[in-house]
Image (tube, rainbow, N blue to C red):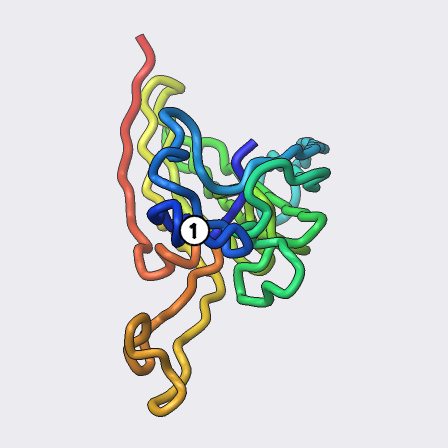
Amino acid sequence: MPLLSDAVQVMPAPLVNRALGQITTAEVPEHGTPGTLGDTMHGVLNALGVIGETPVFDTASWATELTWMTWLEVNQNEAVFKGRKGYDQVDAVDKNYFGLAINFTPTWFQVLPGVDFLAPLSWSQGISGNSAMTAGGQDGSGSFGVGLAADIYSKYRFDLKYVGFYGDNSKCPRVGMANPATCVNGAVDLFNGTNSVIADRDFVSLTFKTTF
């Protein structure tokens, strides 16, 4: 399984430093990655249910998912693994990762003749640790969605939804401390996962579907 790692430098054989995870031009694999490979273990726990009529809504459905993953062993190029000893950046891999996702959808029947209204709400976030896998989840990184839907005669469905993303990142040091080859003063240096990369990419979607 590919694990999160730094970029691997390809160098002429006499200049290769194995301690830095560098490889020779002859060692570039035709398939797979020259980065870190390892063994992982995963677990998923789901729960779902329905809530009856309340003063606020006619009914509501809910679903939750708790995910867990751990890396067991590194068996290729540990020198670039982001869970290696001494690596302490914002995207450093933890031994265990836990993530939580919640969906909640209240429904109001016959708000208009033949029309039911729904308000789908969703939220997901890494609640502990950074996953060893790409897009596997990061602590404090997540997404949310708020929507309004109309179900017309149980045949036509309109959904309007706003979706947002958030996550942590680190910035380069200030002037006098930054490495000019890799850093621009105040520029973002490292993103902790995909959601932090697209934290400024919130969007609104409108979808329509029908049954026939």
Q: Name the quarter where the C terminus is drawn.
A: top left
**Vertical arrangement, residue 186 with respect to residue 118, above or below:** below
Nearer to the camera, 154 or 160:
160
For residue 28, side relative to residue 128 (left or right): left
Q: In this view, does 52 lie above or below 30?
A: below
Q: How many labels does the image show?
A: 1
> Which of 26 and 148 lies nearest the eye of the viewer?
26
Q: Name which quarter of the figure residue 60 lies in.
A: top right
Choose top left, top right, bottom left or bottom right for residue 38. top right
Identified at 67% across, 32% down, the residue is: 50
Give how far across and how far down residue 26 sits, in percent. 36, 34
Q: In which quarter of the image is residue 173?
A: bottom left
In the image shown, does 102 or 4 lie closer to the viewer?
A: 4
Q: Residue at x 33, y 13 (%)?
A: 211
Q: Return the residue nearer the eye: 156 or 207.
A: 207
Q: Name the residue under label 1.
A: 16
Whether residue 124 is visible here, answered yes or no, is yes
Looking at the image, residue 37 lies above or below residue 11 = above
Residue 64 seen by the camera: no
Image quadrant for the N terminus?
top right
Other-residue count near label 1 (Cα within 10 Å), few / some / many at <14 / 14–19 / ≥20? some
**Residue placed at 43% from the left, 29% from the top?**
32
Residue 56 coordinates in the image, percent (x, y): 59, 49
Q: Which residue lies furthest to the top in this view?
A: 212
Give the SS element for disc 1. loop
| Identity of the residue drawn at 27% across and 28% down | 208
Residue 89 at x, y percent in the picture:
54, 66
Q: Position of residue 124 (x, y in %)?
A: 55, 48
Amino acid marked by disc 1: Val
